[in-house]
Amino acid sequence: MKDFGLRISKLLGLDEQQSVQILQCYLQEDYRGTRDALKSVLQDERQSQALLIKIADYYYEERICLLRCVLLLLTYFQDERHPYRAEYSNCVNKLEKDLVSKYRAQFEDLFRAEAPTWETHGNLMTERQVSRWFLQCLREQALLLEIIFLYYAYFEMAPNDLVAFTKIFKEQGFGHRQTNRHLVDKSMDALVDRIGYFSSLILVEGMDIDFLHKCAIEDRTEQHQFSNTPELCKEMDQMLLNFGDIPHHAPVLLAWVLLRHTLSPDESSPVIRRIGNTSLQLGVFQYLTRMLRALGSSGNNCTASTARMCIYGLISFVITSFEEETLGSQQHLIDAACEVLTAPSLAELFWETKPNVGLGMILDSAVGMFPQKIGPLLQLLTALLSDKSTAKKVYSFLDKMSFYTELYKHKPNDILSREDETLWRRQAPKLLYPLGLGQTNLRMPLGTLGQVIPGEQGYMVRWDYSYSSWTLFTCEIEMLLHVVSTADVIQHCQIVKPILDLVHKVISTDWSISDCLLPITSRIYMLLQRLTSVINPPVDVIASCVNCLTVLAARLPAKVWAALLHTGFLPFASTPLTNMAQSISAEGMKAGNYGNLLILIEQPQGEYAVTIAFLRLVTTLVKGQLGSTQNKGLIPCVLLVLKEMLPTYHKWRYNTYGVRERIGCLILELIHAILNLSPEGESQGSAPSLQSLCIYSLANTEAGQAVVNIMGIGVDTIDVVMAAQPSSGGSEGPGQMLIQTVKLAFSVTNNVIRLKPPSDVVSPLEQALTQHGGHGNNLIIVLAKYIYHKHDPALPRLAIQLLKRLATVAPMSVYACLGSDAAAIRDAFLTRLQSKTEDMRIKVMILEFLTVAVETQPGLIELFLNLEVKNGAEGSKEFLLGEWSCLQVVLDLIDSRQQGKYWCPPLLHRSALAFLHALWQDRRDSAISVLRTKENFWENLTTPLFGTLPSSETTEPCVLETCALVMKIICLEIYYVVRGSLEQSLKDTLKKFASSKRYEYWSGYVKSLVCHMAETEEDGSRTFTECQMLVSAWRMLLIISTSHSDVMHLTEDNTRLQLFMDVLEGTKAALLVPMSVPCLRLGSMLATLLLILLKQWKSVIGLAPEILQPLALILESILQADQQLMDRAKAKVFSALISVLQIQGLNGSQLPQLPQLLLCICETIQEEALALMDSTRHTALTGDSTPEDKDSMETDAAPKALHKDQRDGVCVLALHLAKELCKLDADGDHWLQVMRKIPVLPSILSALELSLRVKRNLYFSEAALHLLLILAQTPQGAEAVAGAGVIQSTCLPLLSVYEISSNGATQGSGFSRKSQDAPSWPGVYRLSMSLMESLLKTLRYNFLNDALDFVGVHQERILQVNGPLLISLDCVCVLCSQCLNAVRTVQSLACLDEADHTVGFLLQLSNFCKEWQFHLPQLLRDVQVNLCYLCQTCTYLLHSKKMLHHYLQAKNGDAVPPGPRPQRAPQTPSKQPSSEREEAEQRALLAVQCSLLKILSKTLAALRHFTPDFCQILLDQSLDLAEYNILFVLSFNTPAFDSDVAPSFGTLLATINVALSMLGEVEKKKEPASLSVASFASSEETQALKSLLMFSMENCFYVLISQAVRYLKDPTVHNRDKQRMKQELSSELSTLLSTLSRYFRRGSPSSPAAGLHPSPQTKPPTPGTKLGLEGQEPIVQLVQAFVRHVQR
């Protein structure tokens, strides 16, 4: 490195210390490689030479930058608007003393320096390097002079200094007599001229002409610094007398003439005259015009503005001091004046000065020749337009003209004149323009006087005639329209062009004047049409026309567009556009007059004024948001740009440098405007929209490649162009234009990728962007290297933004594309990210790029993470941060000590946290493991959560996002890390969070934020995205806290209650603004959180104050909103209401909102039911359905626009909520009032009928039936349901729910492998059966006919469910298998449930035996038989528990059948799994037994109605036995599980034995029993089971005795059989009676092995624990009485 430093020192001519410092700065700021690469570069001679030259370039640029810093200080140190004015002023005060002297000396050294050679500076000092050195020399000279000029603009120059500078500049020849002038080439001419310009300006400024003018006006010239320096003046005279050979001398000579003429007019008149003549001969005014144009426009250029102020003073004083005729051509003077007046505030200054002083005299002179010479006046007035006030002054000035000047070659006949011909008088009125009648014209009246000025060309007459120049301008345009096809067109165009330029400037400065100029602007369209259709169109006039229309289009786009369509100027389509292919091919499109003009005139000539104006016009029309129709009319224009201009514009011929870059920039601005159009205006027709056409064209045609080529210019080319610029900066110039073009190309490409519709085919644009070329020849690396660009921070920022987009969507590895440059580019990224003075937006974009890369670019993010493996124990990996790790930068950014500093604003802090959040979200464990163990990491991370934010109105949006990201990171950490493994610092932080009441603070803040959003929604709040993000994060934090309350320390009920109420209030605030989409989204998010908290914090909710009132308010609000927007929100609010009603268990009197809630819900149900019917009909017609044999009946395939039947749909939840409300309305009064207002029941039943018919809308059907079932429990409700036609709506349509095959079996399994509670079509059938049961039970005879209709229609299903065909042994095994699985997979027995519902309905119907017998006698007989068989089957299954248990095990693979065992997953030997399985089996068995017992009890209760009344058959001798069928055969055998064995008395006896046995088991609580029923039942369940068993036993005794007496009284039964029956019954009943008596007296048996068979040999079970004897004695007495009766 030391040797290399010496080589730098020799090449640059510096000492070693400076060389080392330059090397260090270069390596830190501008080196584009890595540290390792530097070693190899230094060892290689060729590479080290290249590095030396780069260091030299860096050194030269640094010198220029230092000078520019001084220039910046001088520019703004007195600008009160600048934020750092005070600091700049201090710097200037410190520099002021030695600034000029040192810079003057430095300037002299530079222009006198000898050029370096290879002998003095080494062999690298080639001719090229010498030229580079000299270019740097000239650049520094120009900058030094610019600084000196600005300095003297603020500070007075001493006369001695003026003389000294004059000598220096004379010696140097104002830049032309450089010591090394032989090295000047053509590219340096601009710099040499610039040196000359500033040399002249310094001398003029040094003479202080402004102060001289002021002294002359106030007659105190002796105060001027040169008034008392005669010797210096003579010295200057002698020097200036020798001037005159260089144009740069002209303004110096003119200024000196002024000074000498003012201070001593008599003393030096010959010298003054000679010097003045020399100045005019040099063309001083042409030179001033050329100089000011070369210095650039004065928009943001302080130097140019200052130069114009200086020259303004000079010209004003010159015109005031000398006669205008002596100053040369008036036009040159006006050109210079117009160029001067472009400086800010000079136009206002002009209007404030007197008209007979300074430039006002030029204006007066121009007015004197108007309108004979129209150009000079209009040129001046155009320059005098700068703002609205000056625009109004110009308009008024031209509107009130008092003189009309015209030239006559001969004296006209209608004139009276004096003898001396100095005054003419008009004898007749005259129309000034030969236009037709009715057209706008000027009429000079009779007697008008005119002053005559004879001349060589004739008589110049100045008429005393008042008129408006704007009318005159209208007439001139009309004249041009008349002569457009004649030879006079060129002359008239010269008149009209300045008019158009003035109109353009006026309406662009002050739009309010445009209405007054309507006669002119309305004629521009016709002018454009005619001028573009002539053989040699006047291009400059056409460009002026288009420029005017562009200004008009900015305010009236539709009007301008409509008028332009008739001009034929713009390209157009001759056939309608129908599709993209036709549009792209440009089939049927015409180029219009503009296209012809471009190809035939502009391209051959190399001048593109019309093209520039055309591009601006089309861009303005596009930005005007015309609407889809007009935008499609612009397609031919845009297509011309995309097909004919963008791919080829760089190949056109150009006469002027910089026009190519301007056209490229304008083309991209047009495309950028199109891509930023809002999609709302785009129509959905077949023809492509303007935006889609643009996207397709860029993605698939040459236009896209042209944009890629622009982006591929690269950072090096831009640096070369910027270095070649002669100016000291500013906003104009080819370099700035090139940068702007590349930036637009980035933005356009980014938008094309963003907006391009997804496709499987890779477009040419995407291919060009992502292709891997050899030797680093791919666009990705070019984009990445823009990070080295320093001039415009927006350029690297937009390049990184495009990289981010490509990293997101393109299937490629950015890391692979970067190749060997990856590490160097990484270092450059991190260097800019670390810099405290870097542009903040670049830092933010770098972090956003890395955030995206975490998920999409694994290789790239590993490069940036730069983690190193720590040498640790075997098998465990620990990581450390590498030297170039982005994590260190991010850790610095989130450090709590850095917050609030200027280098870490909130936006940057947010971006750093977004990157960390991406690491956690993507589970980058290696990086996370390093971060979480860093000291103070969790404290720094969570700092934002412990701060106090300002009010919701003033909080910065990014601060909200910052807090949201912190919350999300904490949630991800807690969720993914095992509870015991959390870092202690995080635990401490969470504990501090809870103890510091931060839960309460953030809950309140989120609530207030949501309320603020709701209140300011109409203002269009811009913080919605950040607000939504914070609400989402807070929701996540609370959800995590419900499952990790111990870690989160959120265990106190009071805190939970406060948080819940805040969520409720926030939800209410958001959803009470029903027409706001943003508020709806917030409300929906909070409603989701509300539901989760309702589920998790039930204990808190029960203690909560009034919850239903706000929920009711929310419901009323959202029901009034847009239905499509509100569906999800409605569903959530309905669910919340249901949950609250279920948790709080209120009654109707505790809910004052009940009537209003019912009304709202019923309106919703009615609307939703009708919509569901429409949707169902539509779906049924289109055939878009799901298979009918699916019980789930998924309806996701339904069209999105149609109402879908969903478990959590609005309609279904509304029905469930109505059900809960009806439960509260015990009397049904509120419900009936609502039904009188709203016909909700007919709507529900109509939708239910349709749904059942087409077997759709399962969830709706089930919910509707649940609601009807609740209503049917009250008499009023049942009447309403029946009256609404429930039987008509459900009876026949219900047949569609199941299908009966020809052999009577159910199609599809009736036994659903689902939870018994899960919706299914068999479940709908069961609910319908329950509904019929409830209605019959409530309404009795009023519903009997309907019930008989129902049982008649569904008799096959009813008989099938209850008959022996249903419950065969295998079926039961399947069912029992399902029941066992129910313990594991929440499945249950649907068929047993259906049997239970069916028997329940039949039990109610059995109360009406006679009516049933009358209407359906055969069905009654069949039902009786099937019920008996069902009784027998249930008895057998309850009795054969071991067999049932064996089948349960066999179906689950636990029995050991003869065949091979099915394979199972290996289990570790443990007792725990087997005990769990055993418990599961017992629960399954218990579930089956309970279901069978319920069915048995209802069956026996129904049979009791089918057998004679016991008292009646004993006491009533006249009882007709034929009314009662014999139900059980006269047999006492044990019941068999066989359909061929008829139910008998043995069945009933066995049923009694089973009941007694189960009673014994229930009582056996203390003894261990594998099959004990009581083992798995609660005390309430046990008591219910006892009652059920006693109920079954009583009914069984009753049926048995009744049937026995029926037999005894039946004369058809043989006496032998009667006698046998008596004996058997006497024996069996005596045994049962003794068992029952012992049960009541002593208690349960000691052994469960008691026999269960009803034979006399079986040992009867001993009695169990005493039940209440008083309650059980009647049955004992009844049986005893019957036994005595039988024994008689």
Image (tube, rainbow, N blue to C red):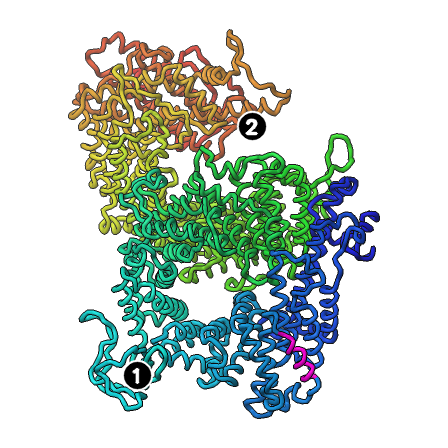
Q: Which residue lies furthest to the front in this view?
A: 456
Residue 1566's disc is: 2
| Residue position for label 1 | 463
User: Dot 1, how many residues are within 10 Å of its Cα: few (below 14), some (14-19), or many (20+)?
Assistant: many
In magenta, the rendered stretch is 232-243
Residue 1424's x, y, as percent? 26, 20
Residue 1183's x, y, as percent? 27, 30
The secondary structure that dominates the magenta segment is helix
- Is the residue 892 above or below the residue 204 in the image? above
Residue 877's x, y, as percent? 73, 35
Callouts 1 and 2 close, C-beta under 8 Å: no
Q: What residue type is labelled 1?
A: Trp
Q: Earlier in the sequence, mark 1 or mark 2?
A: 1
Residue 1557's x, y, as percent? 45, 21
Residue sitting at 40 percent across and 14 percent down? Answer: 1370
Quarter occupied by residue 587: top left
